[in-house]
Image (cartoon, rainbow, N blue to C red):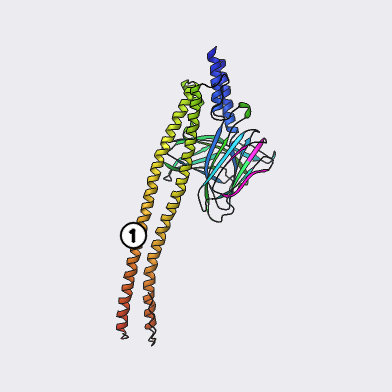
Amino acid sequence: MCNSSYFVLIFSLSQLVSLSYSLYFHIGEAERKCFLEEIPDDTLVIGKYKVELYDENSGAYRPSTPGIGMHVEVKDPDDKIILSKLYTSEGRFTFTSHTPGEHIICLYSNSSSWFGKQKLRVHLDIDIGEHAIDYQQVGAREKLTELQLRVRQLLDQVSQITKEQNYQRYREERFRTLSETTNQRVLWWSLAQLVILVIAGFWQMRHLRGFFEAKKLV
Amino acid sequence: MLAPTLRVLFILIAFLLTYIHSNELTFELPDNAKECFNEKIKVGSKFILEFQVVTGGNYDVDLELKSPSGKILYQVTKKQYDQIEKTAEEDGVYEFCFSNEFSTFTHKVIYIDWRVDGDPEHEITGPNPRVAEGALTMIESKVGNIHRNLESCIDYQTHHRLREATGRARAEDLQERVQLWSIGQFVLIIIVAIGTVLLLRSFFTDRRTSSSASWSR
């Protein structure tokens, strides 16, 4: 009994710490901030954010009033929206990619003021693939020792490397197709231009000769 | 009574496992814009910033790293790739800014990798924290080695992916331009051919006895 309460305390403490020491940036109220993530398919992405509003009275950023929320919009490589939800001032969003490629994660506040001059401070942490796995939970759930947990971490890392290699192969194939298409286009368009030049020359000659013969100048 | 202490130990280690946090972000920096990121760091912590310009213009960007007291710790102009490793000498909010203000119309896509090792009191020097009781066994240290190697493998893969993205963006741009210019030239040739003929015809239908037969093709 004493153990579980201790566990809960440490767990909650670690969660607090992990979000309070985050990278943060400032955006305007009406501003939209987007991040690009190029990921292979079947990859888990977890994003955690916290929004603070600038309080003019105290001159500092404080956790904002319940009104402020953030819209999170995620677009997949085919420009299809796979996640579009409104979260509160502190939120966590998750998605798994189904197609490999560049995903765009956009954050913007749901503030209703059009020309809001207020600055928002956004703490953001995006974890992809094996970084997204919470080993505390895995260890607690499956009751693993530290060594087993480490080995599990190695397995996850290796599977991520494999996925990335597969994706690399797919990308290289696309690049190669692109280069070959460009090569073909250059070839065919050059030939077409050559042919059209010759045709144009002949047509001009013939037309003008007929024209001058009609005018009795030749 | 071994089980409770082991559990506490395990929890402590698991807690430490998540303490080193890394942040990888890729964002687009519009032209004439400056983008800043901040983080509160404790004195003695080590932090590493790595950035690479993926697409855009001459693939260069300005970087400025400021300490909490406003002192500029690191400043470069027009760099494509750089890695900065520093130990925090002050407690407070560190800021690094990327600037694309020298560019008039190219926007850049920048990849950043930001890693902070936590408190020195927790004695974290790497991804393999020292267990409180006794030294690491052989297996544990080997596992730690493998973990570090795999991390650097993933890091190499990331950089390879970025370079490939740069090449591919260039190739896509080239293809678009080839297509546009080819069509444009094709149409222009036809227009010029017809235009020349019409112009010449207009010279001779004025009933002027102009003998200038300037042929132009």
Q: Position of residue B20 (x, y in %)?
A: 56, 31
- Who's the residue at 58% across and 21% down the image? B132
User: In front: A63, or B177?
Assistant: B177
Above or below, comparing residue B39 to residue A3 in the picture: below
Is residue B78 in the magenta section? yes
Task: Tell me, yes or no, if residue A103 can be seen here.
Answer: no
User: In which image quadrant can residue A202 be found?
Assistant: bottom left
- Who's the residue at 48% across and 39% down the image? B156
Q: Position of residue A107 (x, y in %)?
A: 53, 42
Q: Position of residue A193 (x, y in %)?
A: 35, 65
Above or below, comparing residue A150 to residue A91 in the picture: above
Task: State the predominant SS element of the stretch in magenta.
Answer: strand
Quadrant in which the N terminus of chain B is drawn: top right
For label 1, the residue is: A188
User: In front: A10, or A85?
Assistant: A10
State the residue lying farthest toward the top: B1
Q: Residues within 10 Å of mark 1 (few under 14, many from 20)?
A: few
Task: Tell me, yes or no, if residue B160 can be seen here.
Answer: yes
Residue A206 lies left or right of residue A17; in this view the side is left
Q: Which residues are magenta?
A: B66-94
Is residue A16 in the magenta section? no
